Amino acid sequence: MADIKYDIVEHIAELSKSPKGWTKELNLVSWNGRDPKYDLRDWSPDKTKMGKGVTLTDADLANLKAALEKLNL
């Protein structure tokens, strides 16, 4: 498997933290030198390991925001 290169361009929010120190974060990440996208996933404390996540375009994030605003939280 080829190495995946990433650069966390902007840290936006930490949503939670596990007892082992892993954090669920929303970041702006450039994957393999491409334009950055919004990214939601778990990260190890030193950011060298990551869990499965989801990447979102600007339009995806706007649609998610609209959907969340409709919820009664």
Image (cartoon, helix red, strand yellow):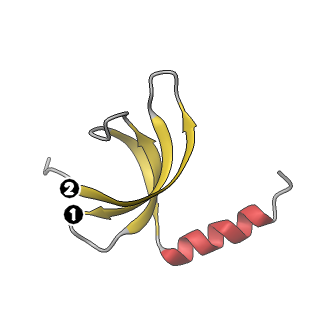
Tell me: residue 47, above or below residue 17: below
**Mark 2 highlights which residue?**
5
Question: Where is residue 39, by image quadrant?
Answer: bottom left
Mark on residue 61? none
Q: Amino acid at mark 2?
A: Lys
Q: Is residue 63 left or right of residue 19?
A: right
- The residue that appears at 48% across and 37% down in the rendered structure is 23
Tell me: residue 17, above or below residue 35: above
Circle 2/circle 1 CB separation < 8 Å: yes
> At which x and y percent is residue 32?
21, 63
Q: Which badge, 2 or 1, comes first in the chain's sequence? A: 2
Q: Residues within 10 Å of mark 2 (few under 14, many from 20)?
A: few
Mark on residue 32? 1
- The residue that appears at 64% across and 66% down in the rendered structure is 64
Q: Is residue 29 left or right of residue 16?
A: left
Q: Residues within 10 Å of mark 1 (few under 14, many from 20)?
A: few
Tell me: residue 26, above or below residue 58: above
> At which x and y percent is residue 7?
27, 58
- The residue that appears at 51% across and 76% down in the rendered structure is 58
Q: Is residue 63 left or right of residue 4?
A: right
